[in-house]
Amino acid sequence: DLLTMKEYHCLLQLLCPDFPLELTQKAARIVLMDDAMDCLMSFSDFLFAFQIQFYYSEFLDSVATIYQDLLSGKNPNTVIVPTSSSGQHRQRPALGEASMEGVEASLFYQCLENLCDRHKYSCPPPALVKEILSNVQRLTFYGFLVALSKHHGINQALGALPDKGDLMHDPAMDEELERLLVQVPGLVNSVTASPEASCLPSRTPPRVGSPWRPLHHSRKVDAESDGSTEETDESET
């Protein structure tokens, strides 16, 4: 389940052809945290990082500005909320940041608390932000983004994705897939014989109670209703 940033962006374009590349890049940087944007990422890591960027994009642009101001010693009370274009440059801190201790967590939280009070865009619940920052003394900007993406409470507050352990578990979708496969005779055999079969749930051969049975019965009834004495050989299907 490892794909590159460009491949994940292609998947997003299947849903929205003009989906902005910048948002995909920002999500990838949360996972990679370096300039190797062609590295492989797991689906779950990318998806939860993407969720944070998708819902809190404008908020995180402002957080990036606050973080840079704290690093440079500026007064955080005079932070200017960046535009989308300026946020693009602010979002990527200096390459040397990874070796720094970051900023003081308590001061960082005070700035974010004020930001949440006056921010008109979506923000993470302040109580959960406080919970994240109360566990450390200092942190980097990307350390904060990683903590947001992995926080169980924030994922629940958004309510868009299941828990990480249940991400690939979807009984309703499995049932729908089974129903669609049944409607196309011969498809299951051809699919399970292909190399991609490992991506599908395991299936047992048709039995008496199998959903394939109604298809065989309907063919036989149709032949009898036409007055034909020829019976359909089920083995042909």
Image (tube, grey):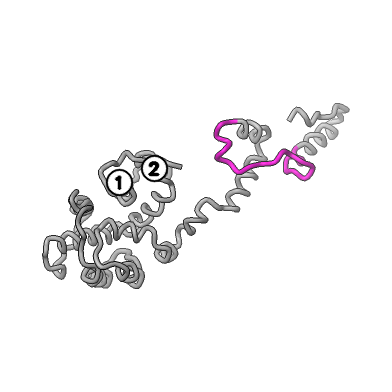
Q: Which SS does the magenta portion mostly show?
A: loop
List x then y, in percent, for residue 235: 77, 29
User: Which residue is drawn at the image coordinates 63% and 42% (left, top)?
Assistant: 202
Q: Nearer the viewer, residue 52 or 96?
A: 96
Whole-percent x, y for residue 109 in the image? 25, 70
Foreground: 139 or 141? 139
Q: Residue at x 55, y 40 (%)?
A: 199
Q: Amino acid at mark 2?
A: Tyr
The image shows residue 49, relative to residue 122, as above or below, that is above
Q: Which residues are magenta?
A: 194-215
Disc 2 marks which residue?
A: 8
**Residue 21 at x, y = what percent?**
31, 44
Q: Look at the numbered disc 1 and give the secondary structure of its residue.
A: helix
Residue assigned mark 1: 25
Picture residue at 15% right of the left edge, 61% below the top: 71
- Circle 2: element type: helix
Tell me, yes or no, whether the highlighted magenta stretch contains residue 205.
yes
Residue 81's x, y, as percent?
19, 62
Write down the quadrant of residue 220 in the picture.
Answer: top right
In the displayed structure image, the side of residue 182 where residue 59 appears, left or right: left
For residue 41, side relative to residue 60 (left or right): right
